[in-house]
Image (tube, helix red, strand yellow):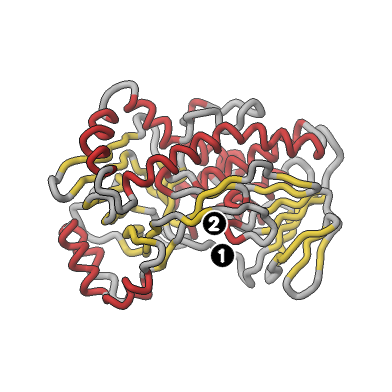
């Protein structure tokens, strides 16, 4: 290691925070995590851990547990319902995406952290940082720390990131996977133009359970959740049946509007994801639409890049090295997310036509087909820059 052990305080026991804690504890640093919940818990439904993210889980020792609960998906497939034509078809080739419930992913990361000498402080809502200390809602503080890591997500009280709200979000829920003709090895979606979209994917099992689960999501303008609730379930279910009759067994499990949770998305990136004694990772550093399925993977890669930088450099040089290592990968995916999202989530009448008649045929021909596969897998650019070459055998 390039320096003496550091005293590190991490704000947030989410995906990035837990991953960073394990990686840094393995380097001999003294690590403390502070989280607002009385009991650490995940927020959200299902997500996909791409090959680059699985590599980080394996380094931490959480990969086997995640795979035991998750479900492999080999394809992302979407149809436009008016013409019943494919408009999205991306295969993983010889690899796969690991679709997993956030609770199962969180459980694997938490167990890995608890197997190390890491201090986890619950019921500590971070409100600010000052003079290398973290300050909490009750007026108490902790520190001083040699380094503070802000992994507290999109609602961070520490991050200076100013993001813009995206026009569309989604309502989602977790359900049991029923008897159905919907393929179990795919992320499947149906569209009418770009302003109506529903998707479903298998997300494996919950911790200590064996019932296969599904994540179901419906695109919705970010300011329309209240109106959707007022219209009632019957109105919405009829819309879904019109788009995709095969989802009836899923719809049967939804008996209240309260089962559907609204997710609103923002877009933005910190140009300088570090400051004096503090560094930002995950959604505290960059946010984007989930259209490319990279959010959790980005947090894992941030944690890994930061740990590698601290392995090779003293902290004053490690933070800029971390930022340089991640800049290219993050920039490319931020721009692609901003560019692709309106073709699948917007009120535009022109973009869906371009998607269906130009983009999709082009995506089925080399080299575009191979580029899209690399994009989904997270390997468009080296995810850690010059710090650590990825093990290509797992991608």
Furthest-left residue in this view: 83
Question: Which residue appears at 47% of the width and 29% of the height?
Answer: 380
Q: Position of residue 301 (x, y in %)?
A: 58, 40
Q: Which residue, given by chain and number where applicable, does mark 1 sit on?
A: 41
Q: Quadrant of residue 37?
A: bottom right
Kindly identify which numbered label has been placed on residue 106: 2
Question: Which residue appears at 64% of the width and 41% of the height?
Answer: 271
Question: Which residue appears at 75% of the width and 68% of the height?
Answer: 136
- Mark closest to the chain's N terminus, 1 or 2: 1
Q: Position of residue 98 (x, y in %)?
A: 42, 45
Question: Which residue appears at 31% of the width and 78% of the height?
Answer: 230
Q: Residues within 10 Å of mark 2 (few under 14, many from 20)?
A: many
Is 221 positioned to the left or the right of 332 in the image?
A: left
Q: Quadrant of residue 111?
A: bottom right
Q: Residues within 10 Å of mark 1 (few under 14, many from 20)?
A: some
* Pointer 1 with pointer 2, Cβ within 8 A: yes
Q: Secondary structure at mark 2?
A: helix
Q: Secondary structure at mark 1?
A: loop
> Where 141 falls versus 6 (above or below)?
below
- Is residue 302 visible from the viewing direction of this image? yes
Instruction: Using the image as rendered, state which of residue 331 and residue 107 is in the foreground.
Output: 331
Instruction: Using the image as rendered, state which of residue 155 and residue 90 is in the foreground.
Output: 155
- Is residue 299 visible from the viewing direction of this image? no
Q: Position of residue 143 (x, y in %)?
A: 84, 59
Q: Position of residue 28 (x, y in %)?
A: 79, 43
> Where 187 falls versus 155 (above or below)?
above
């Amino acid at each position: 290691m390039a320096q003496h052990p550091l005293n590190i305080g991490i704000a947030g026991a989410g995906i990035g925070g837990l991953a960073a804690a394990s990686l840094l504890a393995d380097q001999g640093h003294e690590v403390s995590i502070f989280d607002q919940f009385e009991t650490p818990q995940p927020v959200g439904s299902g997500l996909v851990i791409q090959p680059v993210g699985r590599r980080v889980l394996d380094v931490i020792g959480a990969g086997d547990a995640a795979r035991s609960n998750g479900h492999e998906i080999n394809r992302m497939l979407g149809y436009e319902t008016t013409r019943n034509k494919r408009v999205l078809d991306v295969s993983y080739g010889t690899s796969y995406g690991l679709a997993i419930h956030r609770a199962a992913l969180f459980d694997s990361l938490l167990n890995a952290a608890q197997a190390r000498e890491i201090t986890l402080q619950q019921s500590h809502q971070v409100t600010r940082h000052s003079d290398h200390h973290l300050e909490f809602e009750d007026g108490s503080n902790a520190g001083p720390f040699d380094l503070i890591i802000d992994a507290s997500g999109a609602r961070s009280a520490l991050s200076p990131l100013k993001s813009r709200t995206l026009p569309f979000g989604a309502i989602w829920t977790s359900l049991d996977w029923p008897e159905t003709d919907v393929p179990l090895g795919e992320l499947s979606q149906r569209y009418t133009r770009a302003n109506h979209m529903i998707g479903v994917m298998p997300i494996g099992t919950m911790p200590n359970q064996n019932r296969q689960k599904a994540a179901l999501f419906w695109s919705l303008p970010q300011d329309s959740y209240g109106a959707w609730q007022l219209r009632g379930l019957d109105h919405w279910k009829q819309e879904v049946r019109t788009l995709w009759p095969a989802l009836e067994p899923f719809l049967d499990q939804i008996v209240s509007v309260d089962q559907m949770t609204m997710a609103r998305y923002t877009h933005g990136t910190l140009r300088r994801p570090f400051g004096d004694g503090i560094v930002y990772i995950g959604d505290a550093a960059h946010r984007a639409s989930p259209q490319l399925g990279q959010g959790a993977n980005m947090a894992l890669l941030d944690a890994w890049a930061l740990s590698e930088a601290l392995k090779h450099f003293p902290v004053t040089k490690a933070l800029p090295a971390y930022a340089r290592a991640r800049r290219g990968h993050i920039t490319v995916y931020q721009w692609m997310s901003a560019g692709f999202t309106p073709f699948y989530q917007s009120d535009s009448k022109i973009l869906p036509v371009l998607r269906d008649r130009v983009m999709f045929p082009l995506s089925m021909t080399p080299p575009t087909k191979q580029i899209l596969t690399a994009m989904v897998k997270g390997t468009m650019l080296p995810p850690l820059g010059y710090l650590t070459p990825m093990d290509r055998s797992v991608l």
